[in-house]
Amino acid sequence: AQRVTQPEKLLSVFKGAPVELKCNYSYSGSPELFWYVQYSRQRLQLLLRHISRESIKGFTADLNKGETSFHLKKPFAQEEDSAMYYCALSTSYGKLTFGQGTILTVHP
Amino acid sequence: DAGITQSPRHKVTETGTPVTLRCHQTENHRYMYWYRQDPGHGLRLIHYSYGVKDTDKGEVSDGYSVSRSKTEDFLLTLESATSSQTSVYFCAISESMGLAGDTQYFGPGTRLTVL
């Protein structure tokens, strides 16, 4: 069975500092990985997915199949990055399995 | 925001009563999903639909049923609500469902409290 683990419930950084949100997964097949974000009083929305290899709002994430990880990184955090972040895995059946979520707080 | 609405947005009910939550979309997407969001658990899939009258169970389907009589509407029913079903419920839609890494678009959520 597939599983997604986000080991940090809470993560605090100061504005301008680098930030890394960790995500590890277990799945025997070929995974599709996503990061979704939920800003305060907004809907959950897609931030990025590994298949598109995009950088969104300065965030990047690299799929490391050897370490089964898909960590989200940004070199210089901004206050508007404060939000709940979910890592998610899509299996061959297309259903999403979410991690427990990480609340990122960026202090001024 | 994708054209997804959920109703009601907030509901307080008593243990043992039936509750129906509605998800309505205007995007004509084939796939629809119901999730619940709980602290420490993230989002967990309850049921999903891959077409009109075609539904299947997700990870946490016990105590829930769904129906989809029209493309645009996906109903989630708690037959006899329990306190453990107190949660925030999200509906999502997607155009397809497969290895292409398709995006799911989420509704605003329904906060349900079962007393």
Image: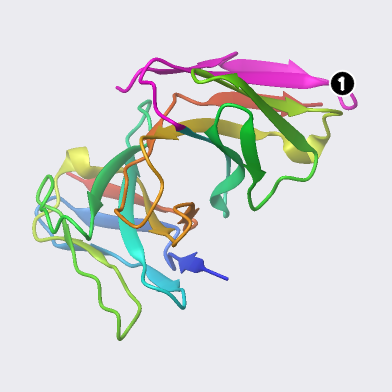
Residue B34 in view (yes/no): no
Q: Is residue B53 visible?
A: yes
Q: Nearer the viewer, residue A102 or A106?
A: A102
Amino acid residing under circle 1 = Thr
Residue B112: name its quadrant: top right
Of the 4 image quadrants, the one containing the N terminus of chain B is top left
Magenta-highlighted residues: B1-30
- Locate residue B79: give its quadrant: top right
Which residue appears farthest toward the bottom when viewing the image? A66
User: Measuring 57% from the left and 24% from the top, which residue is drawn there?
Assistant: B110
Answer left or right for A63 relative to B10.
left
Count every numbered label the image shows and give the total. 1
* Horizontal and vertical percent position of residue A5: 46, 67
Q: Which residue is mark 1?
A: B17
Residue A96 rendering spot, x and y as whole percentages: 46, 52
Q: Residue at x 44, y 53 (%)?
A: A94
Q: Please state, as top left, top right, bottom left or bottom right, where the C terminus of chain B lies in the image.
A: top right
Identify the subunit bearing mark 1.
B
Residue A98, position as x, y percentages in the image: 47, 55
SS state under label 1: loop
Extreme residue toward the right, this view: B16
Residue A37 on the magenta segment? no
Closest to the observer, A97 or A44: A97
Q: How is the image coloured?
A: rainbow
A22 relative position to A4: left or right: left
Q: Residues within 10 Å of mark 1 (few under 14, many from 20)?
A: few
Q: Which quarter of the figure has residue A14?
A: bottom left
Residue at image coords 32%, 35%: A39
Q: Is residue B7 magenta?
A: yes
Q: Is residue A46 above or below residue B105?
A: below
Residue B71 location (% of width, % of height): 50, 20
Q: What residue lies at 42% left-to-right and 74% top-to-bottom?
A: A29
